[in-house]
Image (cartoon, grey):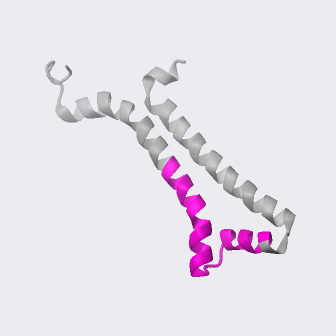
Amino acid sequence: MALLKGVSPLRAVLRHALPNAVGPIANAISLSLSYLFGGVIIIETIFSYPGLASQLVDAVSNRDLPVVQLCVMLFAACYLVLLLAADILTIAFNPKWRSA
């Protein structure tokens, strides 16, 4: 409709399509990154990379409960931060969600 009214195609995409597309894209990216956080445990274990996930695996095998709790809380916090950032981007770019 905007193109029929004489608006340039770039402006039509930036003004009408982009705000509606940012929300699903941000959610898909945040979920993909959260899957990467889950997969890092497997990758670090298989390839013997030093990191937080290998520390978690060693703590589980040694029954070191405080270290296990810390690692799990850090992974959960990263997951929540990713989802919060996706929600904030969705609200910031979509005018329908800003007023609610």
Q: Position of residue 24 (x, y in %)?
A: 43, 37
Location of the N terminus by quadrant is: top left
Q: Quadrant of residue 25?
A: top left
Q: Position of residue 40 (x, y in %)?
A: 58, 66
Q: On the picture, is 93 further left or further right than 82?
A: left
Q: Quadrant of residue 63?
A: bottom right
Q: Quadrant of residue 17?
A: top left
Looking at the picture, tell me which residue is in the foreground, 5 or 26: 26
Identify whether 93 is placed above or below 62.
Answer: above
Looking at the picture, tell me which residue is in the foreground, 76 or 62: 62
> Residue 87: within the magenta?
no
**Residue at coordinates 44% horizontally, 36% vertically from top-left?**
23
Q: On the picture, is 35 further left or further right than 17?
A: right
Identify whether 62 is placed above or below 90.
Answer: below
Q: Residue furthest bottom?
A: 48
Q: Position of residue 42 (x, y in %)?
A: 59, 69
Identify whether 25 is placed above or below 93.
Answer: below
**Residue at coordinates 37% horizontally, 35% vertically from top-left?**
21
Q: Position of residue 88 (x, y in %)?
A: 55, 36
**Residue at coordinates 20% horizontally, 22% vertically from top-left?**
2
Looking at the picture, tell me which residue is in the foreground, 9 or 27: 27
**Residue at coordinates 51% horizontally, 48% vertically from top-left?**
30
Magenta highlight range: 31-60
Q: How many marks?
A: 0
> Residue 38: within the magenta?
yes
Location of the C terminus by quadrant is: top right
Q: On the picture, is 31 further left or further right than 60?
A: left
Q: Which is the main secondary structure of the residues drawn in magenta?
A: helix
